[in-house]
Image (cartoon, grey):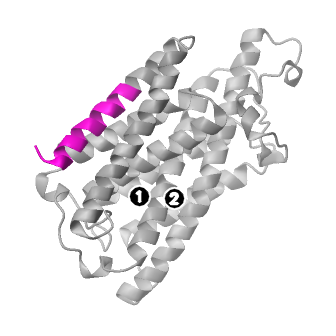
Amino acid sequence: MNIQAFLDNLIFSSLLLVTILSWANTIYPNFKVLEKTGFYGLLATNLLIFLLLSLRWLQFGYFPLSNLYESLMFLAWSITFITILVENQSQISIITSLSVPIALFVCGFASLSLPESMQSPAPLVPALKSNWLMMHVTVMMVSYASLIVGSILGIFFLILSWGSKEKVQLQGNSIGRTFPASSLKMTALTASSFPETLTTQSRERLGLLESIDNLSYRTISFGFPLLTLGIIAGAVWANEAWGSYWSWDPKETWALITWIVFASYLHARLSKEWQGERPALIAAVGFIVVWVCYLGVNFLGKGLHTYGQIL
């Protein structure tokens, strides 16, 4: 067994273990050892993916984002990295149970489903032999990860708020109110935040809803500028490689659609009337759009960006 196969299996096993631990922690929140073990396991997995990509970089002499396998592994690294940042800031461990299964699926697809020919390194096509490769693709992948994590939080918000009669009013800074990041976990758990008529259970539920809603907004707000920067960098690179800033390639078109969807989400959050469920619905649409933009084009479309095309 070569080092890549060994690391693939170890990464997949680690993500599976972290997923089980995070779900167990959701069911048994009083067992703090589950939360700590899962968090440190996620840190270790993130380092393992980083090690795998670094070894490929050192061995083959190019930044490991030239084929679909490397792209998927980098996306998995980005998702775990964003999850670590968000959970460390918010101290809400349920985030891991939502985002890590996505990273598990991505790694499983990359290491178990892709044929060996698509996992093996190959000489770079002429268009990829550029210093723009690292900047453009890296920024785009991190933006995808941020938008995916933020969108899955929005979907989770919709699930939690389904059938709820209490109105959720965001207490984050999208409508001008701020609070320290260290106190995010207690954002909406203060008794004075709710009417006295609400029960303790209702207050706790609203507290979780508001915290998840705010985390979704903050994470998407982090990913959107990166997406914008990545699209601009890609346009400059395209002009150097193909002589045109924009050619309506399927990937370019879907990147623009993704930008419009999340721009609409952020614009909607500026209005007090558009808080809670309606922006979360846009985020849910964005979750699908991101996957179509990133992976769907490789299955369905043919264009200048489909170097890792499957069909």
Q: What residue sits 73% from the left and 23% below the top?
A: 206
Do the CB atoms of the residues marked 2 and 1 lie less than 8 Å apart? yes
Q: Is residue 176 above or below residue 56?
A: above
Type of amino acid at the residue the image marks with label 2:
Thr
Task: Report x, y in % for residue 241.
Answer: 36, 85
Type of amino acid at the residue the image marks with label 1:
Cys
Q: What residue sits 68% from the left and 53% below the top?
A: 266
Residue 8 sits inside the magenta stretch: yes
Residue wearing tag 2: 258
Foreground pick, 299 / 209: 209
Task: Report x, y in % for residue 134.
Answer: 41, 70
Q: Report if residue 300 is visible in the image.
A: no
Q: Which image quarter: residue 185?
A: top right
Q: What segment is highlighted magenta in the picture?
A: 1-18
Dominant SS in magenta: helix
Q: Is residue 239 left or right of residue 26?
A: left
The label number, if any, that marks residue 293 in the structure image: 1
Q: Is residue 308 left or right of residue 179?
A: left
Task: Report x, y in % for residue 92.
Answer: 61, 29
- For the residues labelled 2 and 1, the Cα–Cα distance comes to 7 Å
